[in-house]
Amino acid sequence: MVIKMKTDIEIAQETVLEPVVSVAERVGIRADDLELYGKYKAKISEEYLCGIEGNPDGRLILVTAINPTPAGEGKTTVSIGLSQALGRMGKKAMLALREPSLGPCFGIKGGAAGGGYSQVVPMEDLNLHFTGDFHAVTSANNLLAALLDNHIQQGNELGIDTRQVVWKRCLDMNDRVLRNIVVGLGNKLDGVVREDHFVITVASEIMAILCLASDMKDLKERLGRIIVAYNYEGKPVTAAELNAVGAMAALLKDAMKPNLIQTLEHTPALIHGGPFANIAHGCNSIRATKAALRMADYVITEAGFGADLGAEKFFDIKCRIGDLSPDAVVLVATIKALKYNGGIPKEELAAENLEALKCGIVNLEKHIENLQKYGVPIVVTLNSFITDTPAEIDYIKRFCEERNCEFAVSDVWEKGGEGGIELARKVLHTIETKPSNFHVLYESSISLKEKIQAVAQEIYGADSVSYMPAAETQLRKLEELGFGNLPVCMAKTQYSLSDDPLQLGRPAGFEITVREAYVAAGAGFIVVLTGTVMTMPGLPKRPAAYGIDVNDDGIITGLF
């Protein structure tokens, strides 16, 4: 007899959700402090957020992972399962996670709400329109683009050089044909003809600003600093000079408030903001993280993709800007993913293979070494599969303990919070016995090239960094303009420690190629593009959208 495994969406739809008002009560939020979006999701009011600013902070736990593979790692699933496990142990725990981008849900991923019995719900809402935050970011971004082109059309008082317009339009959909376009075609009244570009909404600087702004005043100041273009003298032109700030802030007013939903076991979850970690800083909002810390004793948050991207940006950008100090890091791996890093094809990963595991575990080793450079104690967890063997598990356990890391097997996909008890105990033990001495990788005072080199050599393991002529010019100009003290946001493939997605394991002897650099002055970092990473993804040959449908009763199927 063949047992059919339930899909994630089937599990989510079978769950009896608590009203979000009841979920809020678990962490002391009254109904009056919520702005309801139906029965199961809500935004938290500004009044409440201001009222808890004096509360003591709980413990902050970051969940990150090895480099992603087709075999899967389950970082979000582990994050959710850990929060549920802490709840089962009587701890006041809370999640602070990113909102998923709409585009990839119809592309290659299919969904982003966890998996199995460790999910946040309602998962269909979360993966689709949710509370409209991404639409607000898209609208604010494109309002600025419209005001920019209108200014040029209406006389161009600021002397904007149309060859040096850097602000791009955005859309929260994978659409490769929008990467490079021409606008303004038609007659004279249809605008000035120029080359333009689209990025996916999560790569918009406004998404980064939303996630890094502390309040409305800070948001407006950051919006005003956005550089949209350069004039004929080579000087930056800002959103403030286009008189765009007030209208953009109005569009973002509600998006600034964190969203409250629940896990399958009713753990409160603040879901807010969603920049990609391969093309942006990859963390949820500072507001949501800080609010959670003031409401709960233990807060689990997550950084996108592998630790070389998400965790590095969490530490060097988010913690630096938000004055956060994490207490522990959970590093997620799977035996299948490690064997894939050891050169085994996806179809053969189920079979025990200690030699492949030994070859691939170097990827885990490098991430452990990287995280230790930040002074935060580490717990390594294996997101378990039924094909994992005792010999393979034992090998990884010994490997981690030899490197002063706690180790636990996580079975949260199958068992929910119950399957995360061992991990939760190891996390609590680590927090109680190993003090965190968190520090950033580099100081703000060093040059941009020195910062790039620090990340490339210390985190990626590169021998050197090369710069294309355009990048050389851009970095020099950015320092001349006074942006040399900002942190760097490295845009790199998520699939490898190098900038070549085919280099698995722990590459050595490679060079990182920087092809472009530009300032996100509002966000407060320098974006450094390496390799061939793109800010507008495309769709695969058979997009996940092909399998998504909704029936006559409004029940969605196929969404992961």
Image (cartoon, rainbow, N blue to C red):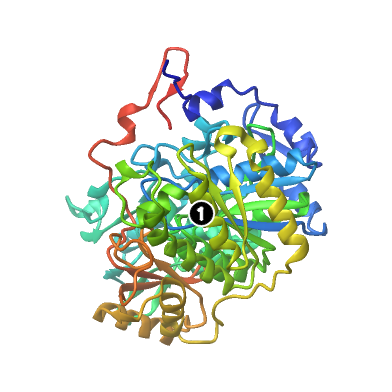
Quarter holding the C terminus is: top left
Residue 315: x %, y % from top left: 57, 68
Residue 439 lies in what quarter of the image?
Answer: bottom right
Percent position of residue 404, x then y: 62, 67
Asked if residue 40 is positioned above or below residue 86 in the image, the reply reads: above
Question: Residue 145, position in %: x, y?
Answer: 37, 56
Pick the residue in front: 449 or 164. 449
Residue 376 figure quarter: bottom right
**Is any atom of residue 6 visible in this view?**
yes
Q: How many marks?
A: 1
**Residue at x 55%, y 71% (from the top left corner):** 316
Q: Is residue 415 above or below residue 327?
A: above
Residue under label 1, please give it.
Answer: 248
Secondary structure beneath label 1: helix
Identified at 73% across, 52% down, the residue is: 298
Q: Amino acid at mark 1?
A: Met
In-image side of 426 versus 13 (left or right): right
View extreme (top): residue: 552
Q: Is residue 172 left or right of residue 404?
A: left
- On screen, 120 above or below 553? below
**310 or 482: nearer the eye?**
310
Write the residue at 54% across / 53% down: 394
Q: Is residue 303 visible?
A: no
Structural crowding at the residue carrying mark 1, measured as other residues with C-alpha within 10 Å and reported as few (<14), some (14–19) or many (≥20): many
**Residue found 42% across the figure and 30% down from its top:** 559
Can you name the residue that lies furthest to the front here? 391
**In the displayed image of the protein, which residue is found farthest to the left?**
186
List x then y, in percent, for residue 214. 65, 61
- Horizontal side of 66 relative to 258 (left or right) equals left
Residue toward you, 404 or 515: 404
> The N terminus lies in which quarter of the figure?
top left
